[in-house]
Image (cartoon, rainbow, N blue to C red):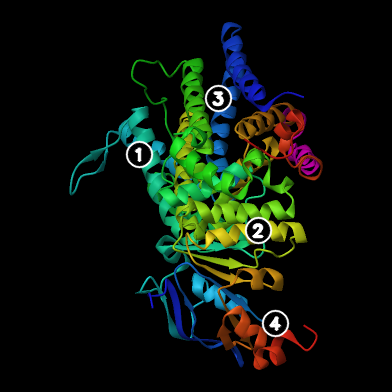
Amino acid sequence: MTDPILATHNLHKSFAALKATDDVSINLYPGEIHAIIGPNGAGKSTLISQICGELKPNSGRIELLGQDVTLANTLARAKAGIGRTFQISALAMEDTVLQNVMLGAIGACGSPWRFFKPILSDTRLRNIAIEALVRVGLQSQMSTLTSELSHGQRRQLEVAVALTLKPKAFIMDEPMAGLGAEGSKVLTKFLDNLRGEAPILLVEHDMNAVFALADRISVLVYGKIIETGTVATIRSSKAVREAYLGDGE
Amino acid sequence: MIRERNLNALVLILLFTVPIWAFFNDQPFTITLATRAVIFALAAVGLNICLGLGGLVSFGHAVFFGIGGYAMGILAHHAQTYTPLMEAPFLIEGTKSMPVIWLVAMITSAFAALFIGMLSLRTAGVYFIMITLAFGQMLYFFSISWTSYGGEDGLSIYVRNEFPGINTLVPVNFFIICFVILCLVVALNAFIKKSPFGLALNSARQVPQRVLTVGLNPTHLKLVAFVISGVITGLAGALFADLNRFVSPTMFSWQTSGEIMIFIILGGVARLCGPIIGAVTFVMLEHFLGGISDFWHIYLGILLLVIVLFAPGGLVGLITGRGISHD
């Protein structure tokens, strides 16, 4: 088997007596979408925070492309190739759509220390930004203020900013949250094609999307991975059904 | 409604023509007032780079204003008393040359801003305001206690400093020097606003976590903005001291920091010419209302209240009809 792009080894994280992450080992292989599902409070966000470097685990290791990044901060991990989208859109609302994507382009080019050249006449940055907007289908909204975008468009913009960075792995925190059925379908199709570019670690509540997209699913309950497997495995797992999917589903 | 670009041009043209008119009509006091407004505006344009673009509410910009003032005061004091600044390990003499004084003021302010910024930027919000205020107060009391440079009484400089090729003793000449500097700095501000740095800084103000995830360090961005900001305000301090031919601890006081911030809030935060309109309004109120009552700050307070409550975009926002700066 090929080496994983991203791997966690026996991660532990506790808040006082609460074990938010309990011995979590997951792998993200090239070309796959690995979904993480679990009921509210299962520790999905805590796990994402540790992978992205906002929280430090109590023990365990995180590897990106074979490098130990456990002690690296958010900034270093972003530079190393983690492309994150936020659950609650973290976009500059006062700026235009293009300006938001431009920020990603500046990050991709590595240096914000240019004070005189107007950014909109910088063809290199502009091309990176527009390419990302075209891919998510927002190019016609380029000069719209972000605050005037619909919720769905903001989700698309989130993905566009991550695209500019050409990351080695995408970490997506509920990209479908708040999208209608139609929007969810569009984004599902988009992510389906994206996995060839870089694997996606997908935290998602929308089960239709998860079952449609995921190559593998890990089920997180009370901070513990109780099962990892293909869609079929998870659907038929008794433990998962009891713990999470409930009787009805 | 006037477009902001046209308003900016109008403001600069008016600010230039009034003193020129005063020159031909022999009204030197008007020229002095205009110069005062230009220098205040310069200090506020400086603060606006970190406050408007970077969201850093510095309540300690008097530090840089004062450093600029004392850079001028100390250098000119040594020049006029013919005593060297220091003799060992190498000789440094005072100077009456404006460009040299400006350079010293700017470099000293840059280092001060770097130091203060590195410590203050570990905090945010109210703590940032308080820690910058604390630095301002430290320097204020230090300047009071520094008796070799006048202590509480400050330093008087008898003759205005020199600029190569220009007779600075003529008020309108000094005004033009200050005005040209203001224009250059406003242009610099306009460039920064549209540059990659400006965009990244503006994002760091709004969504720092996003800036981190694209691999940029928001704290570094803010620190650089703070230093640029401090350097400009420092330069304004040197000019202010030269205008008055006097420097005193008042330049370091928290009221000074507050006034620089008031210029911005009156005019419009993050607007290119907001600080200029704010400073001009302030100086006019100070002049006309100050003639009526010593307590003219009451009226300033009322105006400030009205602006903050009903026109958060400041006077520029009111005139252009747009509450927030977009460009």
Earlier sequence position, callout 3 versus callout 1: 3
Name the residue carrying label 2.
Answer: A187
Q: Nearer the viewer, residue B56 or B250?
A: B56
**Which residue is located at x 68 percent, y 56 percent?**
A186
Q: Magenta stretch: residue A18 in it?
A: no
Residues at discs 2 and 3 both on one chain = no
Q: Are marks 2 and 3 in contact (CB under 8 Å)?
A: no
Q: Nearer the viewer, mark 4 or mark 2?
A: 2
User: Is A156 above or below relative to B299?
Assistant: below
State the image coordinates of residue B179 (x, y, percent, origin top left): 51, 23
Task: Pick whichever, B13 or B204, lies toward us.
Answer: B204
Q: Which residues fall within the magenta stretch?
A: B290-306
Marks 4 and 3 belong to one chain: no
Q: Chain of mark 1?
A: B
Tell me, yes or no, whether dots 1 and 4 are on the same chain.
no
For marks 2 and 3, give the CA distance: 59 Å
Q: Are marks 3 and 1 on the same chain?
A: yes
- Residue B104's tag is 1
Quadrant (top left/top right/bottom left/bottom right) for the N terminus of chain B: top right
Task: Give, as a three-letter code, the residue at label 4.
Answer: Pro
* Amino acid identity at mark 1: Val
* Secondary-structure class at tag 1: helix
Tell me which chain the residue with mark 3 is part of. Answer: B
Disc 4: which residue = A39
Q: How packed is label 4: few (under 14 Cα within 10 Å), some, or many (20 or more)?
A: some
Q: Which residue is mark 3?
A: B35
Instruction: Answer few, some or many: residues within 10 Å of disc 3's Cα (few below 14, many 20 plus, some between 14 and 19).
Output: many
> In the structure shown, which secondary structural element does the residue marked by tag 4 occupy?
loop
